Structure formats: structure tokens, C-alpha cells
Image (tube, rainbow, N blue to C red):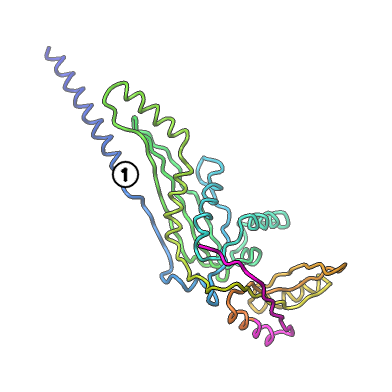
Amino acid sequence: MTIRRWKMCISKSNLKLSAAAVCFFLIMACMPMRMETIDDGSIPPWTIKGGRPKIVAVLPFTNETPLSGLENVVRESFISHLSPLNYKDREIGKVDSTLKMIQKSSSKTWRELSPQKLGEMLRAELLIYGRVKKLKKYYFGVYAQIVLEVEAKIVSCDTGRRMWRTTTTTRTHDGGLPFDLFSISSAAVRSGMFLQNEKITGLVDQLNRRLVAEIPNPPALPLTNTVIELQVASFRDEARAQKALKTIQQQGLKPHIMAVALGSDLWHRVMLGPFYNADEADEVKKAVRKNTQFKPIVIRRDHKKKSN
């Protein structure tokens, strides 16, 4: 009889310890997410140029988790949350096609190129690098949890310096404290199904909403329907256009060549811009006229301002 009571006491003690452990795990899981942010102090200066928000390109994210393709889901969600900010962001399709061209025409991968070189090729002023650092699943009896951690950083294409970085962690969970054997069975099944489905989309969306909220948002453009470009020169001969391009690049500017068909002829225009501020365009025009033999032509066209 004494032995039976002793066994019953041990069983009750184990049950209490298990319940306490589960409660502790639940409390820890529901604590606020950890967010680490590192930046260079001042917010707006590096986000704007000539009174307009800088041009941003979001590069493909890296994936350090066992779930293949998660980096693409996180990146696409990140871009959708970034879009309402005042930056002018390069379209993901154009960024990816340019990076594929680099891959085909160079012995280096795009990840081996400097931010300055990538900025030149993507016609961007800021680059966003992303890293999916963690995706972990935790079990504790009938309790299940997924933890997702992502790092993002913004790098200047002019200097190659990191201007901003954040690491964000978020989590989601399912499960309950059952009161009998039947509820234990159903709770365990529910948690198992939860981890199979993983609710990745909702978790990623929640994380990126918080992550993007930490990004410094530059002042919006003044209301305007006009965008300005400078045509530095135009040549039938592409080699002459490339030579002019290098001359302008030596002035610390970022020109590009635009091929235009006029009748049966193909012309190669050396262009600067786009500019969303007339003063900035005028300043660049004067600098080119002063320091080179070229006399840029101002081209204005209608521009649909990004709605917030």
C-alpha cells in the first residue's frame, strides 16, 4: 500500500513538473520578438540625392535554412512592403535579368562584384542585401513553434559602405494544454499539421512588415508630372558612344547608353538621369559642359509618380 501511494506521488509530481515546463515554454514563446538594428545615426542624408529619394535595387536574398526557395518568398514579400516607401525601386524582373546577364558575360558571379560596380550596372544608388538566417521548428509535447530570422542591410553604391542593417526575428505557434487523453491526441495532431503547413506566408509577411518599418523613409518627391533626362551625345557608331560613356564616367557620373531606331538607322544615345529635381539636372548639365566637350540636351517627359 505504501509503495502504491509512493508511485502515485511520483506520478503527480511528474505531471506538475511537465505542466509547469509547458507553461514556461508558452510564456517564453509569446514574448515580443527580438529586433537588432544598426545604422549610422542620421536618417535622411544618405536616403536622398538632389532633393529626391535615391534609387534602390533589392538583390536576391541568400538562404541559410534547409527550406529551399524560402529566400524567394521572403524577398518578394519584402519588396511588396518596401514599395509604399518613397524610394524609387528597380523592378525585380529588371534586376534579375541584369544579374543573369552579368553571370553569362563574366567569370565572376554578381555576388563577387563591388557595390559600386553593381550600382553602375543596375543603375541604382542603394543596394539592399537580404539573408534568411534561421527557420527552426520546435516541439514540446502538444506545443509546436516556428521561428524565422532575417537580416537586411542597405549599402551605398557610391562608397560601398553599409548605411543601415537590421536583424528581425518572429515566431508563430500552435498547440494547447489538453485535459484528457482524447484532447492530447487531437492537440498533437493539430500541432503536427501546423508544422507540415508551416504557415510560412503569414510568418514571412509579419516579419517583413516589422522589418521594413525600421527602414528610414526619405521625404516624398514634390508633386510633379515631369521627369528630366540629359542626352549627352548620340552616335551611329557604338564604339564612339562607349568612348563618350567612359569620358562622362570619369566625371563621377553614371551615364548609360540607350539604343534608338530612327528610320533605318540605329543611334546610340549617351544619357544621364532620370532626374526628378530640375535643380539637380541643371547642376549636372553645367558640370558636363564645363569639364567635357559635350553639351547635354535636356529631355522632359511625363512621369507617373508612385502612389503611396
- Tell whether position 290 is magenta: yes
- For the point 50% across and 65% down, the residue is 162
Apparent side of residue 285 relative to residue 266 in the rendered image (left or right): left
Amino acid type of the residue that numbered disc 1 sits on in the rendered structure: Cys
Relative to 214, residue 145 above or below: above
Under tag 1, what secondary structure? loop
Which quadrant holds residue 195?
Answer: top left
Query: Where residue 129 sits in the image (x, y, percent)?
Result: 53, 57
- For the point 60% across and 63% down, the residue is 114
Q: Can you name the residue that lies furthest to the right here? A: 264
- For the point 45% across and 43% down, the residue is 135
Q: Quadrant of the N terminus?
A: top left
**Disc 1 residue crowd, few under 14, some 14–19, many 20+, Cα 10 Å:** few
Q: How many marks?
A: 1
Question: Mark 1 — residue?
Answer: 30
Relative to 171, residue 113 above or below: below
Q: Can you name the residue that lies furthest to the left here? A: 2
- Tell whether position 224 is magenta: no
Q: Nearer the viewer, residue 200 or 240?
A: 200
- For the point 41% across and 70% down, the residue is 41
Which quadrant holds residue 108?
Answer: bottom right
Relative to 99, residue 193 above or below: above
Query: Where residue 273 sits in the image (x, y, percent)?
Result: 65, 73
Q: Nearer the viewer, residue 303 or 4?
A: 303
Which residues are drawn in magenta?
Answer: 285-308
Query: Where residue 2 sits in the image (x, y, percent)?
Result: 11, 14
Query: Where residue 234 sits in the image (x, y, percent)?
Result: 78, 75
